[in-house]
Amino acid sequence: MLRALLMTIHIVFVVLWGATAGLHYMTRVIGPKLHFGFPEEGKVTPDGEQCGPTTDNIKDFTLDNATSIEEAGEIMGEHGVVVVPSILQKETTQAFRDYVLKANHILPQIDLKMPENRYHIMPPHTEPIVQKVFNELAEHHQLRPLLDKLLGPEATLMIFCVVTNTYGAIDQDFHGDSTGIATYPEVFVPEFQLGIALQDTTEEMGATSIIPGTSTGCVPDWDEHEEKYNNDEDLQSRYDTFDDYIGYSEALADLDVKATLSQGDGFLYHTATMHRARGHTDPDAPDRAVAFFTFVGSRRGKDDARILPLGQVYALKWNMWGRTVADMATLGKGRPWYFWKAFGLWNGRSGGVRPWNVLDSIFYIFRNDHINAAFGFDLRKEDIENWQTMLESFVIPLTFLYMLLLAFVLPLCLRLLEEEKEEEEVAWSVDGALCYPRAVKGVEGNVNVHKKVD
């Protein structure tokens, strides 16, 4: 009993000190070193370089069955976005939509820009309909080869979520999801996001607005808009800054293309491309739901030092990390060991491919200011720092108690354990005398016992 208690105290203390040391290393040692400062060296696209929309017609970047992967890659290179028709079958898309509309009221909500009248959820991959969605996505004859071309084989899944606009949702601002990919191609792995419409989508339902051609890190030519803002007091009273005016107003309405898609169609875009979710303004239209999947290039070998792009909030259940495009084809088909992929302990990849895992995502939030990771719950850098402070305030006093235990209580416990050991030896000797009297006959300390037996 006493031995078990001492062992438990030691184990608890070691675990607490290990957790404190690990969090201290993450927040005070390695964390500050991970912050990326955007140096001038290695920059490809100059700051403020202007570019216009490459097209105002969605048909210019919509693929058809005859489009080859080479041609699709060229379209993506020019516009930063392509529309891939019929990624999911109609029946699958409708079944998934029905599931999402119910799950919106059950599953936890994830942070989102302009969250009023919007739902943002991460459906679990254990749901059969979710598994079917992944299977069809991975087996599409154009999408997977295109992802391989853009990102390299075995691209890692980083985001899987569904956003639903209901009537009354307002416009978001124009923005890019990531920073630095095009500007520092040798530093960051490439990243693309796929949005699949779960119903036929109109402009009034909030179809995503995209400015084609802005994926290179350049910005549209809005000098005229800036002059208008600076000379209009009414605009200045409605929008605090020029950036707010550009982002939230209709100033760029003549530059964007609305992704009015049919059910099951998808638009794949470079995450640096400027875009925004529109508001839902049609009271007679159904809710507009879009499933989002983000993929990044996996690291190639031990010498690949590229890092994740900055700016994204990676919304993915913790046990889905470490999965690649190839894994989506087998999701739900009996691969229980895939659980270990989340921690990078099992990836089964050849050629040194290293998919991104949970630990990578935790370190990632230290590279970004005011960025969190979403694993089904939100995790911020401040949360980790608070845990570390809390543990230190608890473990330091506990250390003094532990030292007192070693100095005063432990010797007493050792003496008690020694007495307990001697009592066990005496008890064993008595039992031995009763069972094997001849074997112990004449043994000092057991003679009397032997005589009693005789």
Image (tube, grey):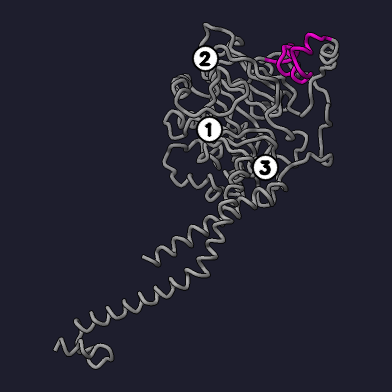
Sequence-wise, the earlier of marks 1 and 3 is: 1
Front residue of 221/105: it is 105
- Please give the name of the residue rendered at 43% of the width and 35% of the height, measured from the top-left corner: 126
- Of the two numbered discs 3 and 2 in the rendering, the one whose residue sits closer to the viewer: 3
Q: For the residues marked 2 and 1, what is the alpha-carbon distance in whole angstroms?
A: 26 Å
Q: Quadrant of the N terminus?
A: bottom left
Q: Amino acid at mark 1?
A: Ala
Q: Residues within 10 Å of mark 3 (few under 14, many from 20)?
A: many
Q: For the residues marked 1 and 3, what is the alpha-carbon distance in whole angstroms?
A: 32 Å
Percent of width and height locating residue 5: 41, 63
Quick one: SS at disc 3?
loop
Percent of width and height locating residue 26: 64, 49
- Please give the name of the residue rendered at 83% of the width and 27% of the height, measured from the top-left corner: 48
- Of the two numbered discs 2 and 1 in the rendering, the one whose residue sits closer to the viewer: 2
Percent of width and height locating residue 32: 71, 47
Percent of width and height locating residue 415: 42, 75
